[in-house]
Image (tube, helix red, strand yellow):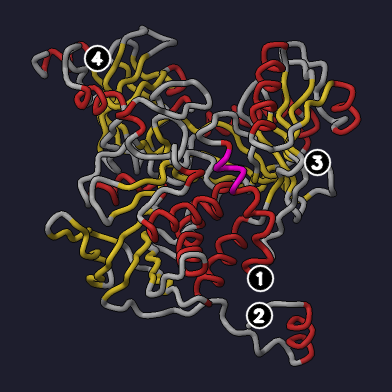
Amino acid sequence: MASLIHCPHCGVRPKEEFSIRGDASLIRPDPEASDEAWNDYVHIRSNPRGRYREHWQHVAGCRRWLVVERDTFTHEVFAVTDAASSAREAGR
Amino acid sequence: MRYSAFSIVKNALTGNVNWTPAWRQPEPKPFYDVIIVGGGGHGLATAYYLAKEFGLKNIAVLEKGYLGSGNVGRNTTIVRSNYMLPGNEPFYEFSMKLWEGMEQDLNYNAMLSQRGIINLYHNDGQRDAYIRRGNAMWMEGVPAELLDRAALKKMLPFLNFDHARFPIMGGLLQKRGGTARHDAVAWGYARAADRLGVDLIQNCEVAGIRRENGVVTGVETSRGFIGCGKLGLAAAGNTSRVGEMADLKLPIESHVLQAFVTEGLKPAIDHVITYGAGHFYISQSDKGGLVFGAEIDGYNSYAQRGNLATVEHVMEEGVTMIPGLSRVRVLRSWGGVMDMSMDGSPIISHTPIDNLYLNCGWCYGGFKATPASGWCFAHLIAKNETHPVARFLRLDRFERGYPIDEHGAGPQPNLH
């Protein structure tokens, strides 16, 4: 994993300032959605070897939720964006 | 060739030129009744018990690298059965009993050393939790012993008892816990399985799973198509990738766990000791090196290497528990890819595909489970029926709402 992460709000900061939540491709289902939809959301993971989008929180900085796109095998970090703007771009 | 004291003397007297390879290097046959994907501890143990206990013939183990090149050769070799939950404890105790007879059974020295494992506690709440765990163990017939500070001071005088933040108040001891030589476990199972006619096929990576009419008919591999009657997956950190070939939706994330070994020392640490205020665990190998590790790095990874921040954290925990460690030099460190499940407990299960079986989710605790994992998986494949001690370890427990969460951390693999 890269040691330095480029936070869109705080600039280049050490990775240890961030807390990792997990897979950012999951979308919380409607409260009335089926058990299967909720099971997929809570338990099922694509777990790719390669490009992966993850939710990180900059807990020792701006405390914003971020989407970090990185490679799970080479540990290269491609992009860091604010989670709110990513969601907006996705039309949510 | 059967190994014995006599065979050692005989071969020594004849110049040690008559030793034969421990297993064959067979070419893959076009069809096997059972194929196991993954030539690690669990896959090899499964093949061995399929042949020995369930009388199956025509079995192959496919391994993409060399036998034992994954986590069975990259762990901290700890063997124990000190779990609390009813879904886990009988399974791990079954494993512990198999460990105790394994070397005779395999005719191979796995250097099992039941030196005792001690979990330290640092406050009243933790003591109560350990009493509860010890009682849960006793209820499954597994002896456990609570040690107070005085008893612990006599046994482990080098611990940092009076640490200002995390003083050591005592520990929970499982005397039958200990360590085993990890590579020897893989080699022992491989050799014993080979002697029963199992084909161990190395450098054979599975690239696809062929299905017809909803059942598996074989696997595409780097050495061509191989047909099979039943297919078992024991691919550890690569489970999701292999599962994807059969469109399985799995509750697994792959994470990296690091481990460390120091230069060789004279005998200093007689037990396996785990730190209660962190995740640190340590033992001394028979070569003299201190073997230790702690938490997973905390992010999804398929790389067999970790981060320096975790290295620093592990060292800090170790020195907090045993100040003398600060004088020891670390020789090497390495990482392994863990198949972390969503509740921290393993999966030995049927899948939605009739003749496809799944063995995964070992998190960072698969080594101790090797014999029972192999036995229960073999039972499942041979009889198409779950083994009684593995009945809670089913894949569908997540959707049914019956997770086995020892830590109570919820479906968040990087917290288990």
Respond whether the residues carrying marks 4 and 3 are from the same subunit: no
Where disc 2 sits, the SS reads loop
Callouts 3 and 1 on one subunit = yes
Taking the spot 80% from the left edge, 41% from the top edge, the residue there is: B269
CA distance for labels 2 and 1: 7 Å
Residue B184 in which image quadrant: bottom right
Amino acid residing under circle 3: Ile
Under circle 4, the secondary element is strand
Closer to the camera, B11 or A50?
B11
| Residue B67 seen in render | no
Give the label on residue B2, or none: 2
Tell me: A26 left or right of B167: left
Q: Is residue B153 magenta?
A: no
* Residue bearing mark 4: A82
Rendered image: mark on residue B107 = 1
**Image side of residue B142 versus residue B366, left or right:** right
Question: Residue under circle 3?
Answer: B269
Name which of mark 2 and mark 1 comes first in the sequence.
2
- Dot 3 falls on a residue whose secondary structure is loop
Give me the C-alpha separation between circle 3 and circle 1. Answer: 29 Å
Identity of the residue drawn at 84% across and 49% down = B266
Which residues are drawn in magenta? B90-94
Which mark lies nearer to you, 2 or 3?
2
Query: In the rendered structure, which amino acid carries the disc numbered 4?
Result: Asp
* Image quadrant where residue A44 sits: top left
